[in-house]
């Protein structure tokens, strides 16, 4: 299987280190696991707290068109920050912590970005940070009525964007969860391009990867487009499927109409954070006049395809709260589709037992809680000077964008668990870490020990595990 073909020379300049440097605890190999204490699972009434976790779950969509006058979607009268707050209000009860952010460069299709454009980008990301949102960032030129830009312009803009990101590394680290390849054609979806040439698409994507932070994954719309990207970027590539309907054979899916075969795709999809959106519920299949309505998609097939893709995020904008053309739409309907634990097992879908109410869960709530990672601490303990903890992932995907796992002792001293890798949780298996505690800390002393999982060391956000113990974003979750 070859997913990536072409070669170009990327930049070798290292990106600035983000976050603080933590002392690392030595890995321990021997300990008495009978000293483990079980951690209380989260109560069903407290499950909504898990929705505050970053970089996972149902997400909404916002956009900004750089230049004057300020507007959200190209040609609209909506001011970008007004749209941001309107979307936050619209989806308040759904509690998304992620938004897809389109940055339209269409007003600069014949000229470099100016200081005004770069200042607007900074203002938008700052507003997202202030409102507790992290973004899937996509740069785009074209819409249904606006053409894309030629390669010479795209190349210049990407150089400017890379320089801007390097100069604003802390802001980018706090707000950008994932990049999307974008750039090409209508809405940056990789089709309907006019000014960019087919042979230049790979150049555009390779340039994007070479000038952006090396810790950011880049989601690509189709397998065919990913084939154009240099093999050296493979570890950073993810997918976004913008026509998720529970059918892997149609021509607009990520595979481009070729049904997947074999088991190799599990490894391809499980290594990175992936995103998807359903088509508009008001639309017809493949936009054909005789196509069937898309407002009542099969919840079982959608959940299975989400698990197959190891989705971290799924759009709330599509097939939910749209308009009055063909309501109710799929996500709304799924609030009345219920599954038991046995039914989930039969469908091959993972689940956290504590999240079922009277033995069942509706399809909307199931997706909301199981997209991305859903981590629970099963047990933790101390044997002499060795601390050990066992965790399990009940979600569709690993916590790919959360690269720092640490211990916080007495709310004061923080130490890295260097053996941690997000990929440890790519499957729904238990994982144990054991480390040697600092001198003076052990089972004969009384200490508060918390586990902190975050995008980088010292990040202002941290994960809440599916356990009922004390939690703060500064210290993480208390485990002992």
Image (tube, rainbow, N blue to C red):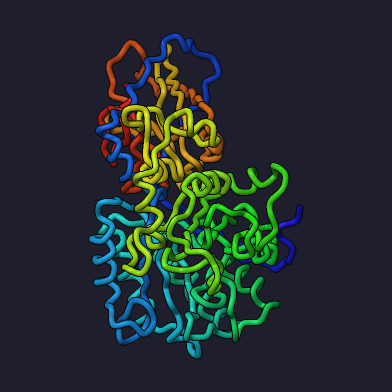
Q: Residue at x 42, y 16 (%)?
A: 385
Placement of the C terminus among the 4 image quadrants: top left
Is residue 218 shown to the viewer in this render?
no
Q: Residue at x 57, y 57 (%)?
A: 239
Q: Is residue 171 left or right of residue 347?
A: left
Residue at the front extreme of this rendering: 290
Q: Is residue 7 left or right of residue 408?
A: right
Q: Residue 381 appears at what percent x and percent y?
A: 40, 17
- Above-or-below relation of 25 to 123: above
Res 356 → quadrant: top left
Viewer-closest of 215 and 178: 178
- Above-or-below relation of 21 to 164: above
Q: Count up the numbered dots.
A: 0
- Above-or-below relation of 106 to 137: below
Q: Residue 193 appears at what percent x and percent y?
A: 59, 80
Res 413 → quadrant: top left
Viewer-closest of 82 and 176: 82
Q: Residue at x 50, y 90 (%)?
A: 110
Residue at the right extreme of this rendering: 1
Res 424 → quadrant: top right
Q: Residue at x 41, y 14 (%)?
A: 36
Q: Residue 165 appears at what percent x and percent y?
A: 44, 67
Q: Residue 63 appears at what percent x and percent y?
A: 37, 71
């Amino acid at each position: 299987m070859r997913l990536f073909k072409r070669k170009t020379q990327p930049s070798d300049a290292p990106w600035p280190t983000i976050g603080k440097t933590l002392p690392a605890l030595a890995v321990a190999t021997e300990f008495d696991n009978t000293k483990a204490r079980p951690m209380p699972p989260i109560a069903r009434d407290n499950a909504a707290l898990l929705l505050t976790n970053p970089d996972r779950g149902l997400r909404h969509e916002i956009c900004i068109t750089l230049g004057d006058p300020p507007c959200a979607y190209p040609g609209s009268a909506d001011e970008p920050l007004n749209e941001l707050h309107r979307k936050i209000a619209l989806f308040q009860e759904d509690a998304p912590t992620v938004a897809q952010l389109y940055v339209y460069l269409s007003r600069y299709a014949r000229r470099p970005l100016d200081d005004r454009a770069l200042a607007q980008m900074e203002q938008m990301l700052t507003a997202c940070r202030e409102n507790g949102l992290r973004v899937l960032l996509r740069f785009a030129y074209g819409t249904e009525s606006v053409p894309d830009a030629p390669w010479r312009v795209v190349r210049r803009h990407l150089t400017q964007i890379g320089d801007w990101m390097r100069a604003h590394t802390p802001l980018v680290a706090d707000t950008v969860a994932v990049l999307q390849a974008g750039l090409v054609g209508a809405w940056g979806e990789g089709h309907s391009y006019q000014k960019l040439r087919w042979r230049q698409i790979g150049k555009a994507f390779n340039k994007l990867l070479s000038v952006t932070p090396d810790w950011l994954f880049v989601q690509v719309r189709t397998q065919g487009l990913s084939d154009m990207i240099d093999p050296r970027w493979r570890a950073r590539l993810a997918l976004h499927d913008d026509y998720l309907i529970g059918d892997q054979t149609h021509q607009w899916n990520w595979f481009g109409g070729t049904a997947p075969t074999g088991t190799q795709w599990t490894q391809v999809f499980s290594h990175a954070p992936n995103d998807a959106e359903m088509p508009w519920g008001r639309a017809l299949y493949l936009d054909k006049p005789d196509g069937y309505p898309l407002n009542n998609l099969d919840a079982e097939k959608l959940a299975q395809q989400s698990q197959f893709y190891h989705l971290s995020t799924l759009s709330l904008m599509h097939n939910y709260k749209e308009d009055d053309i063909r309501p109710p739409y799929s996500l709304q309907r799924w609030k009345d589709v219920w599954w038991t634990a046995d039914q989930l097992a039969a469908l091959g879908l993972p689940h956290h037992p504590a999240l079922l109410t009277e033995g069942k869960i509706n399809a909307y709530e199931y997706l909301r809680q199981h997209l991305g990672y859903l981590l629970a601490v099963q047990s933790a303990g101390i044997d002499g000077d060795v601390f050990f903890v066992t965790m399990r992932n009940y979600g569709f995907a690993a916590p790919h964008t959360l690269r720092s796992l640490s211990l916080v002792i007495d709310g004061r001293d923080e130490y890295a668990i260097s053996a941690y890798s997000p990929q440890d949780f790519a499957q729904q298996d238990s994982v144990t870490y054991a480390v040697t505690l600092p001198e003076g800390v052990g089972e004969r002393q009384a200490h508060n020990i918390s586990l902190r999982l975050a995008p980088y060391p010292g990040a202002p956000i941290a994960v809440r595990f599916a356990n009922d113990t004390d939690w703060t974003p500064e210290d993480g979750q208390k485990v002992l």
